[in-house]
Amino acid sequence: MRPTDILKITPQGLYCAPGDFHIDPVRPVAQALVTHGHSDHARPGHGSVLATTETLRIMAVRYGEGFCGTAQEARLGESVAIGDARVTFRPAGHVLGSAQILIEAGGCRIVASGDYKRARDPTCLPFEPIACDVFITEATFGLPVFRHPDLASEVRKLLDSLALFPDRAHIVGAYALGKAQRLMALLREAGYDRPIYVHGAMERLTDLYKAEGVPLGEVRKVVAAERGKLGGEIVICPPSAIQDLWARRFPDPVTSFASGWMRVRARARQKGVELPLIVSDHSDWDDLCATIRETGAGEVWVTHGEEDALVHWCRTQGLEARPLHMIGYGDEGDDADAPREEPAA
């Protein structure tokens, strides 16, 4: 069976004909397999959803308990038959509960990796390379210019700034799911033991991480009336909030943004970021290339991001490769959770 007989692109997303299911569909479908909880991959309204326990809990927090008709937990490493296909979930290292999905049908092995990273993350299981015939990869940072620096050095930048400006609140923009909690955990590993303050939009997801046993230390929700008292503290909020009236109410705030896009200085200037932190939950160029090699795949499909550059590199390595030009992915959409201004009390 050819790979294109197993998986094809539809308006809803990637569709597996032998199993009659979609992977990370962008529109409601009868049967969805979901790689992780970011809103560009996990959407409500499906008839049934198969995902890891953590991803199902994240979807329930974000969309409510009735986010789908029926929910089924996928156990990592356990092969499950769906129609004429078998699927296995393996860790993707992206955020809590994130997984790659191995599809086996007609003697062919295809891995849909969702979003993934290879850098260490104390808040989720690390990525596991899977031998396959076809590897489906993202390419968010699929250009050679994107080489992420050492994480410890980026966290040290934040702590050094805090020591240099002890009277200024440090407002760090970070995605509400994954990035925010990873940054908290990295700060704890670096020895920071003061309370970390968060925007109200991050409270429930942070509580979920803590309930799953992720050590984040003391985390406090920002009380609007007390923002003026938070000089010298670290406050984490959705990226849109750092440019909002909400952030200006803090004492002489240092605006920061934790993202792989902070490698591009023009982006930092455009967003008015004083302290850019290059912290990404996606693989950089070197890790994308290394991962493709590790899978042993002879064919690579690139879903979204800098598709053409990565496809070109694959072809120079003697691999078959093609861009899928899939629409609706790449924007994690966590800002949608953030109100423009929290009430005064």
Image: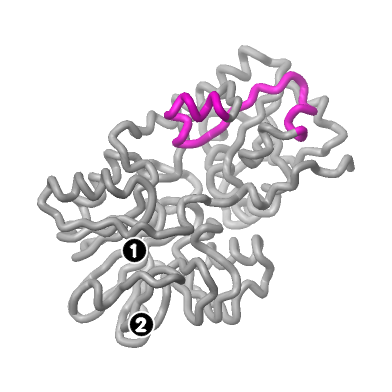
The image's colour scheme reads: one colour
Q: Position of residue 24 (x, y in %)?
A: 45, 66
Please give the name of the residue rendered at 23% of the width and 70% of the height, measured from the top-left corner.
109
Alpha-carbon neighbours of circle 2 within 10 Å: few (<14), some, or many (≥20)? many
Task: Tell me which segment is drawn in magenta.
Answer: 245-270
Is 158 positioned to the left or the right of 222 in the image?
A: left
Label 1 is placed on what type of residue?
Ala
For disc 1, the marked residue is: 112
Between discs 1 and 2, the one toward the N terminus: 2
The front one of 219 and 193 is: 219
Q: Position of residue 241 (x, y in %)?
A: 68, 37
Q: Position of residue 300 (x, y in %)?
A: 23, 58
Q: Which mark is residue 19?
A: 2
Is 214 positioned to the left or the right of 119 in the image?
A: right
Label 2 is placed on what type of residue?
Gly
* Magenta highlight on residue 269: yes
Q: Is 300 rendered above or below residue 87?
A: above
